[in-house]
Image (spheres, rainbow, N blue to C red):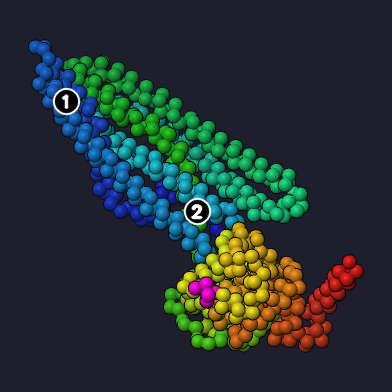
C-alpha cells in the first residue's frame, strides 16, 4: 500500500480534508461574515475609548453627554457583535459535527471495501485508530482550535485594517516588530509537524499492540507469555510517551515566544508615539486607543501559539485518515455491470496469478501462479494443499474479496470484474475458516443475513440442515448467547452457526474454508451432515484442511507452491501416486497413530 500522505503539506492536507468533508464548506461565507461582525465588537471599544477621551475630556471640563452616548453606542454594538459571534460559533459547531459524522462513516465504509490484499498488511489496531483516535483528534480540534482560527483570524484581519486607518506609521512599527514572531512560529511549526506525525504513528502502534494482547489473551495465558507481551506493550508505550513529550516540549516553546514579542511590540508603539508627540497629529486618545488595538492584534497571535500545537495534531490525524481514503477500494464496482444468469453457476479460473501488495506498492512473491480450472455448475470440489500453497487465497479470489494480479475468474460465464458487488454477494456466500460471531444470541447472529425472518423461520432453516439435535443441547436453544467473538461456543459450533447463516442466503455458489482446529467426532458428523444438505444442488468449493472432506468431494484440486499440480477424483489421485497421494498417506498415518494412542489411553 502506497503512502502518499508523507508528501502532503499542511495546506494540502487541509484542502483535501475540506473536499473529503464538504459539510465544512456549506454556508461558510455567512459564518465568516458573522465572525467578522463579532470581531467588530472587540474593535469598537478602543475606538470609542479614543473618542471619549478626545471629545469628552476637554479644557473646559468633562462632557458627560458625549461620554454617555459613547457608552450607549458601545452597549448596542457589543450586544450585536456578541449575538453574531455566538451564531457563528453555533454554525461552525454544527457544520463541524456534520463533517466529522460524514467523515467517520465514509472512513468506516471505505475500510470495509478495501481488498483483502490491503487488509492483510494493515493491522486491525491501526485501522481502528483511524476511525476512533484520529477522528476524535479532529473533533477536539474543532471544539477549540477551529473556533480560534475563525474568530481570532477575523479579529486580526479587522484590527490590522483599523490600525492602518488610525495611524499607518504606528501600524507599520507594530507589524515590523511583531513580524519575527511569524518566522519563529514557522521554524517551530516544521519541527511540530514531524513530531506529531511520529507521535500519531506511535499511538497507532500502541493501539495495535494492546488490541493483539487483548484478542490473544487465551493464547498468551496458555503459553505463560504475559511478561513477554507486557514488555512489548511497555516498549511501544514508552516510545509513544517519548514522542508526545518531545512534541509537547516543542509546543511549550511557542507560548513564551508570543508573550515576549507582545511586550516588544507594545513598547515600540508607545515609544514611537511619544517621540512623535502632538505635532504629528496623534492625540492622547488616539495613542491610548492604538495601544488597545495593538493588544487586540497581539492577543490572537499569543493564542495562535497554543492553537498551532493542536492544529498540528489535527493535521497529522487528518493525514492518516485521508491516507486510508486514498487507498483504492478493492475490488472496484464495475461501471457497466452484467447480471449473473439464473440457476446453478459454474466457476472458471483462467491463468490466474496473485501477489499481495507491500507498503511500497510493489508485489510480494506470487501466492498463485498460472492457475486454471473449470468447475461445473452443481459440482462439489475440494481444494487441498500444504500450508502456504495458496488454497485460501484462491477461495478469496473466487469470492472476489480481491482481484487477480493477472488472469480472470468468471462465474456463470461472466467475469467477476463485470459483476455488481450486490449481485455477487447474493449469489456467492463464503463461510470463512474462523467464522466471526457477534456478541449476542445465535438468533441475532443468523437474523442479520435476512432481517425479516421470524424466529420460527430461523429454526426451520436449522431443521432443514438436520441440526435440531444440536440446537436442543444448548441451554437456551436459538436464544443461547454466543459471547464475544462466539467464545462461549466451540470452534465446531461456530462453524455450524456459519453454515446455517449461509443457508439463509440460499447462494448458487458456496465457498467453505474449512476450520483447521480439531472438533469432536459428533460435531464433525453434524458438520458433514449439514454441509451435505447445504451443498445439494449448488456449486460447492471447500478449502479442505482435513482430507476426509476431500474424499467425499466429486473432485479434488491440488495446489503446491501456488500452482495447480493435480486435478481429479479422490480415488484417481490416490492411485496416481503424486502430491495428493503422499498427502493422503501422511494424513491416514497420522489419523491411525492418533486413534491408536487414544485407544491405548
State the residue position of label 2.
131
Residue 429, quarter of picture: bottom right
Q: Where is residue 396 in the image (x, y as percent from the top left)?
A: 61, 72
Q: Which residues are the magenta region? A: 454-458
Tell me the quadrant of the picture where the C terminus can be found.
bottom right
Q: Where is residue 264 in the image (x, y as percent from the top left)?
A: 37, 22
Residue extending furthest right? Answer: 600
Which numbered dot is residue 11? Answer: none
User: Could you tell me residue 100's position as x and y percent?
Assistant: 41, 52
In the image, 151 versus 11, the foreground residue is 151
State whether residue 220 appears in this view.
yes
* CA distance for labels 2 and 1: 51 Å
Q: What element carries label 2?
A: helix
Q: Magenta includes 457? A: yes
Disc 1: which residue: 71
Q: Residue 503, how many percent across, how many down?
A: 57, 77
Residue 366 visible from this viewpoint: no
Q: Majority secondary structure of the magenta segment?
A: helix
Residue 107 appears left or right of 50: right
Task: Find out whether residue 426 is within the magenta segment.
Answer: no
- Please tell me in which quadrant of the rendered image residue 70 appears: top left
Residue at 61% over, 74% down? 499
Contact check, label 2 and label 1, Cβ < 8 Å: no
Which residue is rendered at x = 24% and y = 39% of the image?
Answer: 83
Q: Residue at x 72, y 83 (%)?
A: 552
Identify the mark nearer the N-term, 2 or 1. 1
Amino acid at each position: 500500500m502506497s503512502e502518499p500522505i508523507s508528501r502532503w503539506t499542511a495546506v494540502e492536507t487541509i484542502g483535501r480534508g475540506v473536499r473529503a468533508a464538504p459539510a465544512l464548506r456549506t454556508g461558510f461565507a455567512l459564518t465568516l461574515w458573522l465572525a467578522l461582525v463579532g470581531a467588530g465588537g472587540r474593535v469598537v471599544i478602543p475606538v470609542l475609548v479614543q473618542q471619549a477621551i478626545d471629545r469628552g475630556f476637554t479644557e473646559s471640563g468633562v462632557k458627560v453627554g458625549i461620554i454617555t452616548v459613547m457608552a450607549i453606542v458601545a452597549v448596542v454594538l457589543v450586544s450585536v457583535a456578541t449575538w453574531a459571534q455566538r451564531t457563528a460559533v453555533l454554525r461552525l459547531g454544527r457544520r463541524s459535527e456534520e463533517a466529522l459524522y460524514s467523515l467517520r462513516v465514509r472512513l468506516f465504509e471505505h475500510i470495509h471495501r478495501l481488498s483483502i490484499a490491503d487488509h492483510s498488511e494493515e493491522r486491525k489496531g491501526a485501522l481502528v485508530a483511524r476511525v476512533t483516535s484520529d477522528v476524535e483528534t479532529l473533533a477536539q480540534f474543532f471544539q477549540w482550535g477551529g473556533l480560534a482560527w475563525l474568530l481570532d483570524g477575523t479579529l486580526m484581519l479587522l484590527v490590522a485594517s483599523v490600525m492602518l486607518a488610525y495611524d499607518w506609521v504606528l501600524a507599520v512599527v507594530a507589524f515590523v516588530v511583531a513580524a519575527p514572531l511569524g518566522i519563529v512560529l514557522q521554524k517551530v511549526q516544521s519541527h511540530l509537524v514531524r513530531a506529531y506525525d511520529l507521535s500519531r504513528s506511535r499511538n497507532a502502534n500502541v493501539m495495535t499492540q494492546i488490541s493483539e494482547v487483548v484478542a490473544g489473551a487465551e493464547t498468551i495465558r496458555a503459553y505463560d507469555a504475559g511478561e513477554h507481551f507486557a514488555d512489548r506493550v511497555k516498549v511501544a508505550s514508552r516510545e509513544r510517551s517519548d514522542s508526545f513529550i518531545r512534541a509537547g516540549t516543542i509546543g511549550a516553546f511557542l507560548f513564551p515566544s508570543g508573550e515576549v514579542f507582545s511586550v516588544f511590540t507594545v513598547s515600540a508603539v508607545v515609544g514611537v508615539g511619544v517621540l512623535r508627540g502632538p505635532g504629528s497629529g496623534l492625540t492622547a486618545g488616539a495613542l491610548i486607543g492604538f495601544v488597545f488595538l495593538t493588544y487586540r492584534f497581539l492577543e490572537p497571535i499569543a493564542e495562535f501559539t497554543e492553537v498551532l500545537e493542536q492544529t498540528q495534531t489535527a493535521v497529522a490525524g487528518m493525514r492518516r485518515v485521508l491516507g486510508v481514503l486514498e487507498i483504492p477500494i478493492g475490488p472496484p464496482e464495475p461501471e457497466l455491470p452484467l447480471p449473473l444468469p439464473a440457476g446453478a453457476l459454474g466457476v472458471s479460473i483462467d491463468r490466474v496469478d496473485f501477489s499481495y501488495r507491500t507498503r511500497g506498492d510493489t508485489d510480494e512473491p506470487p501466492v498463485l501462479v498460472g492457475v486454471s480450472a473449470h468447475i461445473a455448475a452443481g459440482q462439489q470440489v475440494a481444494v487441498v494443499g500444504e500450508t502456504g500453497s495458496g488454497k485460501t487465497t484462491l477461495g478469496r479470489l473466487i469470492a472476489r474479496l480481491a482481484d487477480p494480479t493477472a488472469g480472470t475468474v468468471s462465474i456463470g460465464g461472466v467475469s467477476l470484474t463485470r459483476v455488481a458487488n450486490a449481485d455477487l454477494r447474493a449469489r456467492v456466500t463464503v463461510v470463512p475458516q474462523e467464522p466471526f460471531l457477534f456478541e449476542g444470541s445465535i438468533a441475532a447472529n443468523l437474523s442479520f443475513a435476512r432481517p425479516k425472518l421470524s424466529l420460527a423461520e430461523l429454526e426451520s432453516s436449522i431443521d432443514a440442515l438436520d441440526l435440531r439435535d444440536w440446537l436442543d443441547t444448548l441451554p437456551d436453544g436459538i436464544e443461547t448467547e454466543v459471547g464475544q467473538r462466539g467464545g462461549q461456543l466451540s470452534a465446531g459450533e461456530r462453524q455450524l452457526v456459519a453454515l446455517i447463516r449461509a443457508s439463509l442466503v440460499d447462494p448458487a455458489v458456496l465457498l467453505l474454508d474449512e476450520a483447521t482446529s480439531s472438533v469432536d467426532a459428533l460435531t464433525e458428523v453434524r458438520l458433514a451432515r449439514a454441509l451435505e444438505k447445504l451443498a445439494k444442488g449448488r456449486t460447492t468449493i471447500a478449502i479442505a484442511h482435513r482430507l476426509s472432506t476431500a474424499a467425499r468431494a466429486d473432485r479434488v484440486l491440488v495446489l503446491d507452491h501456488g500452482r495447480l499440480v493435480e486435478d481429479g477424483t479422490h480415488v484417481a489421485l490416490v492411485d496416481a501416486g503424486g502430491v495428493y497421494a503422499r498427502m493422503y498417506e501422511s494424513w491416514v498415518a497420522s489419523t491411525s497413530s492418533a486413534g491408536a494412542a487414544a485407544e491405548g489411553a
